[in-house]
Image (cartoon, helix red, strand yellow):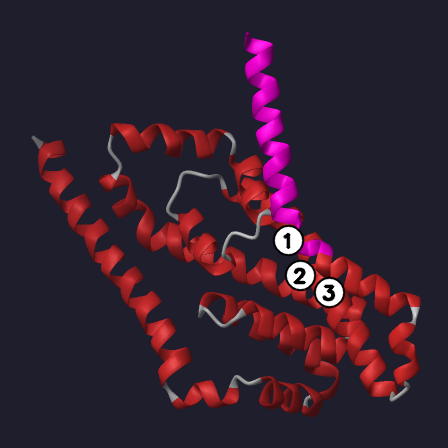
């Protein structure tokens, strides 16, 4: 009897949290796109602000990146800004740290506010996929990061599944390294040439290497998918 009474309360609590979660998502998108705040979130404004804060710039940039991830701020803007201000290597480090903090925060928001409601909607057919994600969390997250699944939606979405946080954290940390480094190295290299004013450096090895890496990054998802297909095919033949 007590369990019967408790069930509607749990469903009601889950529904309330889901409404808060949906309101947060809608509010974040509205805040960034349709309020005066968007005027301060341009590359020029953010760059001027970070240059003005001096030694605090790396820490403040990481905080901005982490919050930006949760508020659906375009990752390419923040990543490119980091590479342009801090250079290829420090820019990569600060971007990676900011992305990890932001993705972890978004995961916990999704897990805290949306997981219960999502679980109540999962039927028998979907439950097996949810269980599979829990068993293979690291591999699933790593694969989706390597094929460039949309970053912010995945952060919140994974919080709705049964995946363990540390599997999610490790898969994200490893999965975004390649793409992040390639993009920051490319932007940072071009910024160095621009800042030096020596346009002859455009034909240097470093510039060509950065361009080659950048072009290669577009083929990474196809390569990963092909490897996964070949791996699945091999598994089928072994079973036969």
- Where disc 1 sits, the SS reads loop
Dominant secondary structure (helix, strand or loop) of the stretch shown in magenta? helix
Question: 37 above or below 162?
Answer: below
- Among the 4 quarters of the image, the one containing residue 27: bottom left
Residue at the spot 57% in from the left edge and 41% down from the top edge: 143
Name the spot of residue 15 as percent of width and height, x first. Answer: 20, 53
- Where disc 3 sits, the SS reads helix
Badge 2 crowding class, 10 Å Cα cut-off, few under 14, some 14 to 19, many 20 or more, is: many
Of the numbered discs 1 and 2, the one sitting upstream in the chain is 2
Question: Residue 234 in magenta?
Answer: yes
Residue 142 shows in the view: yes
- Mark number, residue 92: 3
Q: Disc 1 and disc 2: Cα gap in Å?
A: 8 Å
Badge 3 crowding class, 10 Å Cα cut-off, few under 14, some 14 to 19, many 20 or more, is: many
Q: What stretch is highlighted in magenta?
A: 216-240
Question: 117 above or below 71?
Answer: above
Residue closest to the far top: 240
Q: Disc 3 and disc 1: Cα gap in Å?
A: 11 Å
Name the spot of residue 147 as percent of width and height, x first. Answer: 58, 48
Q: Mark 1 points at which residue?
A: 176
Residue 63 shows in the view: no
Question: 96 above or below 154?
Answer: below
Q: Do the CB atoms of the residues marked 1 and 2 lie less than 8 Å apart?
A: yes
Q: Is residue 37 left or right of residue 100?
A: left
Q: Name the residue under label 2.
A: 96
Residue at the spot 56% in from the left edge and 68% down from the top edge: 75
Residue at the spot 44% in from the left edge and 47% down from the top edge: 158
- Mark number, residue 59: none
Q: Do the CB atoms of the residues marked 2 and 3 lie less than 8 Å apart?
A: yes
């Amino acid at each position: 009897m007590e369990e019967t009474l408790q069930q509607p309360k749990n469903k009601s609590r889950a529904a309330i949290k889901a409404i808060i979660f949906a309101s947060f998502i809608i509010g974040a998108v509205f805040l960034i796109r349709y309020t005066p705040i968007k005027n301060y979130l341009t590359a020029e404004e953010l760059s001027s602000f970070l240059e003005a804060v001096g030694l605090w710039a790396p820490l403040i940039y990481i905080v901005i990146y982490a919050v930006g991830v949760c508020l659906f701020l375009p990752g390419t803007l923040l990543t490119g800004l980091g590479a342009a201000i801090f250079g290829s290597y420090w820019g990569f480090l600060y971007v990676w740290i900011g992305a990890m903090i932001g993705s972890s925060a978004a995961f916990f928001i999704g897990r805290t506010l949306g997981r219960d409601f999502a679980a109540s909607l999962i039927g028998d057919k979907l439950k097996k996929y949810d269980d599979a994600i829990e068993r293979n969390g690291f591999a699933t997250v790593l694969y989706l990061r390597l094929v460039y699944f949309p970053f912010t939606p995945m952060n919140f979405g994974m919080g709705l599944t049964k995946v363990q946080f540390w599997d999610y954290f490790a898969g994200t940390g490893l999965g975004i390294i390649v793409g992040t480094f390639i993009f920051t190295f490319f932007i940072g290299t071009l910024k160095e040439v621009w800042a030096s004013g020596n346009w002859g450096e455009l034909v240097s090895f470093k510039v060509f290497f950065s361009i080659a890496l950048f072009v290669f990054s577009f083929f990474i998802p196809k390569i990963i998918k092909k490897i996964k297909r070949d791996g699945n095919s091999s598994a089928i033949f072994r079973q036969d």
